[in-house]
Image (cartoon, rainbow, N blue to C red):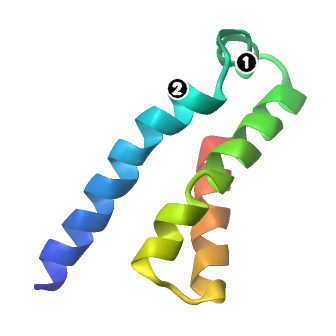
Amino acid sequence: MAFVIMMAVFVALTFWHFPADWLFQSHKEALAKAKDRKVRLWHCTKYALTYVPLLWFFGPDWVTMAWCLGILFSTQI
């Protein structure tokens, strides 16, 4: 049962990535984030914050949510 829950969370996080990028990332930002640190940090912040509703749906406490957002942010840098 735990495996099924983990896979459901993984699938939700994976498929959440596509609309988040499509809605919140411009073409200019997509090209510039590889070269400009400021653009990359702004992209990482927006990207991590788009996961708040999804994480809230799965119901972790605030400490767990903060850790998850920190992991999401740091993996995008």
- Residue beneath label 2, please? 22
The picture places residue 52, in percent across and down from the top left corner, at 60, 63
Pick the quarter of the image with the N terminus: bottom left
Residue 59's place in the image compared with 53, above or below, is below
Residue at left 67%, top 75%? 66
The picture places residue 65, in percent across and down from the top left corner, at 60, 77
Pick the quarter of the image with the C terminus: top right
Tell me the number on the disc at residue 74.
Answer: none
Q: Amino acid at mark 1?
A: Glu
The picture places residue 27, in percent across and down from the top left corner, at 65, 10
Q: Amino acid at mark 2?
A: Trp
Residue 74's place in the image compared with 47, above or below, is below
Query: Considering the numbered disc 1 on the image, is that residue within a helix, a strand or a loop?
Result: helix
Residue 2, quarter of picture: bottom left
48 to the left or right of 17 = right
- Tell which tag, 2 or 1, sits nearer the viewer: 2
Query: Considering the numbered disc 2 on the image, is that residue within a helix, a strand or a loop?
Result: helix
Residue 15, quarter of picture: top left
21 to the left or right of 42 = left
Residue at left 44%, top 73%? 57
Q: How many marks?
A: 2
Query: Looking at the image, is mark 2 or mark 1 earlier in the sequence?
Result: 2
Residue at left 54%, top 63%? 53
Q: Residues within 10 Å of mark 2 (few under 14, many from 20)?
A: few
- Residue beneath label 1, please? 29
Residue 21's place in the image compared with 9, above or below, is above
**How far is disc 2 from disc 1 in space, using C-alphas?**
12 Å
Residue furthest to the right: 38
